[in-house]
Image: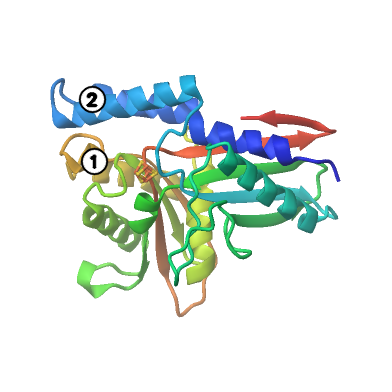
Amino acid sequence: MMDLKEAICELIRLTSTDLPAGVEKRLREAANREEPGSAARLAMDTILANVDMARKNSTPICQDTGTPIFFVHYPSGMDTGALTAQIRSAVELATQRSTLRPNAVHSLTGKNSGNNLGNDTFPTIHYTAIKEDTLTIDLMLKGGGCENVGAQYSLPDTSLDAARDLDGVRKAVLDAVHRAQGDGCAPGFLGVAIGGDRDTAYAASKEVLLRDLDGRNPDETLNQLESRLTQDANEMGIGPMGFGGKTTVLGTRITCLYRLPASYFVTISYMCWAYRRRKMTLTAGQVTYE
Ligand code: SF4
């Protein structure tokens, strides 16, 4: 198979240093909504200056370069063992080049591996086989602070008066936003999975964050719930970094999974303002990025 190490290393560099235009646009709109001179406006202006500087200097947008999470869609029959080895080599190379901070720490000893590799579990790689001949690799760099405020609810939840319906989902998501109080570096984005088991739901709540920010949810009911959740979260007034203000959440994406009759999970992954995600596509030997 073709050697993709340098191409994947470039995907990592782009993701770590160059925030997607759609994310930056939402950050600018949010900054303009805040009162000039307020703590919220100052926080947003600082964030935007940082985004600009990182792009110009090709340096990480945030000092925490996060957990690298790869979502790979590969042509059926491709050697995923070889691809995994290339992804891991690219992560190691990106760490040597300081595009990634060494972030893989042994949970018992606290020792940092120094190269962002840990067992077979760091970085995270999800594989899906497809019929087409195109390889796509989506990369998300998920910051620790925002990962810490992710949450999973099992409905019904009597403490929230949340039943097994969409209003119950809404109450669970808003409870997670309220509990975070701006921790995890607000304003950010909500990825929500309804249903599944505990394991699949967390992965799905992250993968849904890869959807086009301006696109509509194909399910109209979920589309309306996404808008309502963003609006309701912003009415809480938590604001950028929890300083108070008009924008706590910049967007919401929801996916729906099948579930057991006995279970009804609502799983929330929160993505901070440093919403670092990029896609690499390999078609007929040509690599492109978006
Ligand atoms: S949560 Fe995001 S913005 Fe905050 S420190 Fe972590 S990576 Fe950086």
**Is 286 on the left-hand or right-hand side of 64?**
right
Query: Which of pointers 2 and 1 lies earlier in the amino acid sequence?
Result: 2
The x, y position of residue 71, in whole percent, is 62, 50
Nearer the camera: disc 2 or disc 1: 1
Crowd class of label 1 (few under 14; some 14 to 19; many from 20; radius 10 Å): many
Residue at the disc numbered 2 = 33
Q: In terms of secondary structure, where does tag 2 sit?
A: helix
Q: Amino acid at mark 1?
A: Met
Q: Quadrant of the C terminus?
A: top right
Q: Which residue is painted at 71% across and 36% down in the image? A: 6
Residue 109, placed above or below residue 11: below
Res. 42 visible in picture: yes
SS assignment at label 1: helix
Q: Which residue is mark 1?
A: 241
What x and y, as percent, mark residue 217? 50, 43
Q: Residue at x 32, y 42 (%)?
A: 230
Residue 92 % position (x, y): 62, 47
Q: Nearer the viewer, residue 257 or 85?
A: 85
What amino acid does circle 2 point to?
Arg
In-image side of 215 versus 159 (left or right): right
